[in-house]
Amino acid sequence: MPDNNKLTDKAYKVREMILCSVKQSGTGHVASSFSCAEILSALYFGGILRYDPKNPRWPDRDRFLLSKGHAATGFYCVLAMAGFIPEETALNVASSTSKVGVHLQSDIPGVEATSGSLGQGLGIGCGMALAARMNRQNYLTFVLTGDGELNEGSIWESALFASHQRLNNLVWIIDRNKMQCSDFTENCVSLEPLDEKISAFGFNVAQCNGNDCNSIIETLSDVRSRPKAKPVCLIAHTVKGKGLPDVENDLFAHHYLPKISDIERLINDHIRPNLVPEKEDD
């Protein structure tokens, strides 16, 4: 099992970089990106995903799709930390000189598909998983959706397809922070009991603490051996805005942007205390 402290450190470095990106760009979805920082860190730095940043289109790479494309700010930071793109690219979002926008775009190394219009990632992932089977390739396809995104009918159509095709090389991860753009998910279209509903659609369903890297890794530990002939769904319970106490579980934090003058204070007060101290040379 990877060192959880080191992975937590990665997740908070992602958060620090997100705030630096907002400071430079003045835009981004902070709370949604903070929510999934541990999920992305576990996948990319915890030994789950197979990838090669020097060869982003390596045919045998695992595919990862960020269906909740509004969290692109966080994903760009992860891609930079993993070596796919320069750090400056991740920090310069949606300006006249930037290469990346507020939502995810597929011309960036390490990005499999453009996203931002919700409800599409799981369907694309089904196609990739089916293609792997037809082409006799062993890669896995991971799709991260939001839970508010589950309002989209295309999600459930895709779930039916994945089950019918017995796509046990598909891993659907739900960032279950129980919030969406304007309200709690249960006030908009109730999802509970979510595990039972997805299980009824023919998935092998597991749940974990989505803000704990080792919980994520342990829950997905056997995913590559595909113990069941069913697609996998991991309901990762998270806190929206995790890491910023004033934003955590704030119903109106979806479009939260800190004041530029406050960002260094937020980093010093809430992000850096969670980082692993660097060891001094002997």
Image (cartoon, rainbow, N blue to C red):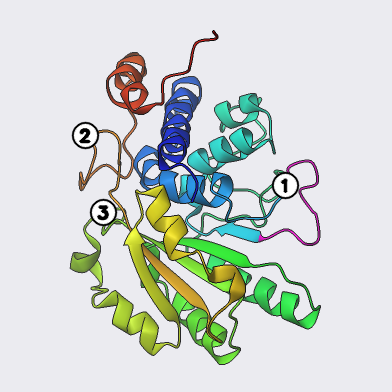
The disc, 3 or 2, on the residue closer to the chain's N-terminal end is 3
The disc, 3 or 1, on the residue closer to the chain's N-terminal end is 1
Coordinates of residue 204 in the picture (x, y in percent): 44, 80
Q: Residue at x 30, y 41 (%)?
A: 242
Choose between 271 and 263: the one closer to the eye.
271
Give, as a single range, the part of the protein colored magenta.
Answer: 52-62
Of badges 1 and 2, nearer the viewer stands 2
Which type of secondary structure does the marked residue at label 1 adopt?
A: loop
Of badges 3 and 2, nearer the viewer stands 2
**Dots 3, 1 in contact, CB < 8 A:** no
From the image, tell me which residue sits under label 1: 107
Coordinates of residue 34 in the picture (x, y in percent): 38, 41
Residue 145 within the segment the image draws in magenta: no
In the image, 179: left or right of 155?
left
Magenta portion: prevailing SS class: loop
From the image, tell me which residue sits under label 2: 245
From the image, tell me which residue sits under label 3: 182
Most extreme residue toward the front is 282
Q: Is residue 158 visible?
A: yes
Report how far apart the C-alphas of labels 3 and 1 lie in the structure. 30 Å
Where 240 falls versus 18 (above or below)? below
Which type of secondary structure does the marked residue at label 3 adopt?
A: loop
Which type of secondary structure does the marked residue at label 2 adopt?
A: loop
Report how far apart the C-alphas of labels 3 and 2 lie in the structure. 19 Å
In the image, 204: left or right of 252?
right
Report how far apart the C-alphas of labels 1 and 2 lie in the structure. 35 Å
